[in-house]
Structure formats: structure tokens, C-alpha cells
Image (cartoon, helix red, strand yellow):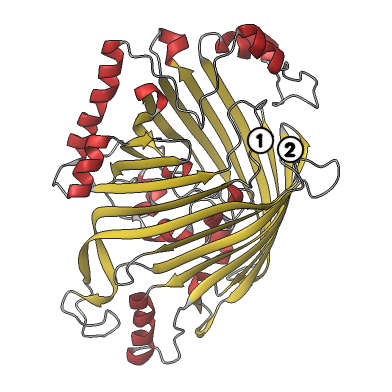
Amino acid sequence: MKKKLKTRLLLSGAPVSLSFLLSLAIAPCAFAQATGEAAPAATPTQAEPQTPAAKADQTPPAPTGFWDRSNLFGDMGGLRPWLGNYGVTFNLQETSEYLNNLSGGTKRGGAYSGLTQFGLVVDTDKAIGLPGGTFNVSGLQIHGTSLTQRDLQTLQTASGIEADSTTRLWELWYQQSLLGGKMDVKVGQQSLDQEFMISQYATPFMNATFGWPGLPSVDMLAGGPAYPLSSLGVRVRAKPSDSWTVLAGVFDGNPAGNGVGDPQKLNAHGTNFNLGNGALFIGEVQYAINQPPANASDPQPAGLPGVYKLGFWYNTGRFDDPRFDNTGLSLANPASTGVPRSYKGNYSFYAVADQTVWRPSADSPQAVAVFARLMGAPGDRNLVDLGMNAGVTLKAPFKGRDNDVVGLAVGYLKIGSHASGFDSDTAAFTTPGYPVRGAETVVEATYQYQVTPWWQLQADFQYTFNPSGGIPDPENPSQRIGNTVVVGVRTNIVF
């Protein structure tokens, strides 16, 4: 979803439309095809050329035993390797979980959620002789109930798979490698949480804020182009060296499209290919240290690996003030027009850090890693103006459990100044004692148990302070709803 020309246009503030940018993005792909440019996919480092015999010696055959292979169905009677000969790979996995709210929120009780994911990837070099190209399509079948929406009322959703039950298209894109793998361009329907704002060491946690963070989920239109939604756009990735990576992209500004209501229902099946809702620009610079070599037989770096990222996003749409109307009166004032003040554009800056801090040796599976993310947004047009999360994970916590992970993390969202001001105005004008929202904090402890390479079980505990920053109890508006205590279990099977 990026390109150098587009990046220059974005940085210069040129008033170009999203449709025009998309049309420009197709040019590099078409040029590469026309010239027959051999552009292998980008890798962290380029391995030295090897003979087929050397590769065979260094790459042992994949395990085929039921308990040892990477997926439940194995090679499916030879179907997978046969498709692989033509550049086609597919994946199918099922995630199921049960979460129970033991205390707080608006209601106690449990809920089941499930997600079936399907993906198909085509290497265009093997399939049709187009070097450096990758085609991807993926779909979601979401089932079950959202515990957060029904019982918790938290801003930081208890599970990253909670969503409206439906079957939907998720991503549909084509990626072309350029400049010998130093750059690639991706065009099509994409989900930003696959590449932007990612913390590698936050992924074991179940709460959604450790995946797609709480601030963009709350502040972006329709929650942004992130699970379960996506947007049409262009992403460009450049890798000037092994240590540095630059991402930049432009997407449709509202993945739900036009309309009022639940964004997931407005785009119920992921087939609203919108280009008329403004533009969302996003950029990220990544710096990696002590990364493992592409060739596993090469010496491992002596230092501990880490990745550091700085980024921003800007949406050209209009955003309402949560406190003041179009005349400057508080929306809580009975004399207010009820029409919020409107602002052109919205933005945020963010930083991400992933760092391994301890391991016995370079080849040991055991390691302690930490992560941290910090992001801010203007408080005059957003419900949340500051978001932070951080945590620590221990891989291989016990002898013989090399692929297990145990972790502890904290997520924090601060309610914006104007949203809190509205609460103060409500207490002054209409509802004495009305609670003023401040911040929401979630603490999560989790353990991932790798039963087999294709089957994982996970136990989880979450405690949330001040759900939604301390919203009033529906039964007693002068009091806040109680802190939530959630326990759960998840299972994930790769077919």
C-alpha cells in the first residue's frame, strides 16, 4: 500500500485524491511485468547462493508424524505439495475460546467466541512466470458472542477475535517486489493490523489492545482498517539495509463506508470496496538490531534482538468534538444546539519497542522479552487521547516446554480532555454526581501451552480498572460500573 511517489505527495501535502494515488500505484507493478524484471521477495537478509544439493543437506524433511507435523491434516494426501509446485499455498485454522466475567461490568456470565480463518497465497513466479509477485486472499467466519459488548463495556476488548457473527472477505491484494527485493508495493484490500503498529512480543496476549491498540480502535473511523474490517489502499515498503525498514501507505478513510450504525453491519461481508470516504495516510520507520540471519546455519548474533518503530497516521475525514456544539456551548447544556463542533482531519503519533532482555545462549529456546507501545492523539476530537501498553514474556518457561509462553501485560487508555469535560458539564447542568471518566487500565496474565505444532491451548486472566474510564452504572448513574474480572481458555488448531 505504498510507493515512493505517493510518499512524496503525502509529505508535501499535495491535494491528491485516493483514487488518483491508487491509479499511480499500479504503474510500478505493470512496469516490472512488462520489463520482465526479476525481483525476488524481500527478506531480512539475503542468503548466499547455494547449490540444490547444499540446500537439501541443510533443510531436513518436514515431520510427517501426527503429533509432530505443522498442521493437523499433514500434506493432505499429496495435495499440498502438488499445489506448492504451482506456487499455491493455503491455510486454515480455527480459534475457539470461552471467557467468563466473574465480577463487575454490567452483567456477569460467560460467552463463547470462535473464528475460522482461510487464506490462499499464490507465488506468481511459479504460477504464471511473473517474478516477484504475490497474490493473497483471505476470509473469516466469525461465530459466537462478544462478551465485551454484552457484559463488560470496556474500551479494551477482552479478546482479539470478538466481532459480529458473519462470513466475510478480509484481505484481497497483490504485492510486487522491486529493486532486487529492496522494495515492494502492495495494492488491494488490506488490514493495517497485519503490518503497522505491531509488537511481536505482545501477540501472545488475548486482549485486543495488545494486537490492534486501543487508541486507533477507538479514535479511527469504524475502528480503522483492522480485524475484522479492511480497506482498499496501497502500501509501499522499502528496506535500504538489513537494519532499516520504511512503511508508508494510503487507504480509504472509513472501512465501513457511508451510513450510521454498527460499522461491521454496514460492511457485513467485507465487500464494500470503498474509495469515497476520505483518505487514511500512515507511515512507519523500523530499526532492528541483532536479528537472526536468513540462513539458519550462519552464526547467530551475539547481542540480544530488538525492533524499534516510530509512526504516525492522519485521516482526512471530519471528526466531532465530544464536548462542544457548533456555537461553542457544551453539548450537556440544555441550551445547546445538539450539533457537535466538527474538525477537519484527525491524527496520532506512536512508538513501539520490542526487546529481548535475557537468554542463556544464542541458540537457547528460553528467553525473556519486553515490549512497550505509546501513542497520542488530540483530545478535542477523540474519546481517547493517550494509549500505552507494556509487558513481559518468558518463552520456554519449563524444561521440555520450548514453545510455551507465559506473559504479564498492562494496557492503559486515557479519556480525552473534551470527553472528560463533557462529563463535568453533565454533572453541573443535568445530573449532579455524574462520574467524570478518567482512564481505563487492564492487566492480563496468560499462558500458552503448545500441545503439538498444530494445536495450542491458552489460559487467561484479565482485570480491568474503571471500564470505559469509569462510566456510570445504568442502575445508578451517580456510581461507576464495577471493575471486571475475566477468566478464559482458548484453543487454536492449524489444519
On the image, numbered disc 1 is attached to which residue?
A: 300
Q: Are marks 2 and 1 in contact (CB under 8 Å)?
A: yes
Residue type of the residue flagged with mark 2: Asp
Place of residue 178 in the rendered image (x, y in percent of width and height, measured from the top left): 35, 24
Q: Is residue 134 left or right of residue 470?
A: left
Place of residue 377 in the rendered image (x, y in percent of width and height, measured from the top left): 35, 65
Indicate the quadrant where residue 54 lies. Answer: top right
* Above or below, comparing residue 378 to residue 249 in the picture: below
Identify the residue shown where x is 19% and y is 77%: 337
Extreme residue toward the right, this view: 399
Identify the residue shown where x is 28% and y is 60%: 346
Place of residue 495 in the rendered image (x, y in percent of width and height, measured from the top left): 66, 27
Residue type of the residue flagged with mark 1: Gln
Indicate the quadrant where residue 390 lies. Answer: bottom right
On the image, numbered disc 2 is attached to which residue?
A: 363
* Above or below, comparing residue 421 to residue 400 in the picture: below
The residue carrying pointer 1 sits among few (fewer than 14), some (14 to 19) or many (20 or more) residues within 10 Å by Cα, namely: some
Which is more toward the observer, 298 or 65? 298
Label 2: state its secondary structure.
Answer: loop
Distance Cα–Cα, label 2 vs label 1: 8 Å
Q: Earlier in the sequence, mark 2 or mark 1?
A: 1
Identify the residue shown where x is 21% and y is 42%: 8
The residue carrying pointer 2 sits among few (fewer than 14), some (14 to 19) or many (20 or more) residues within 10 Å by Cα, namely: few
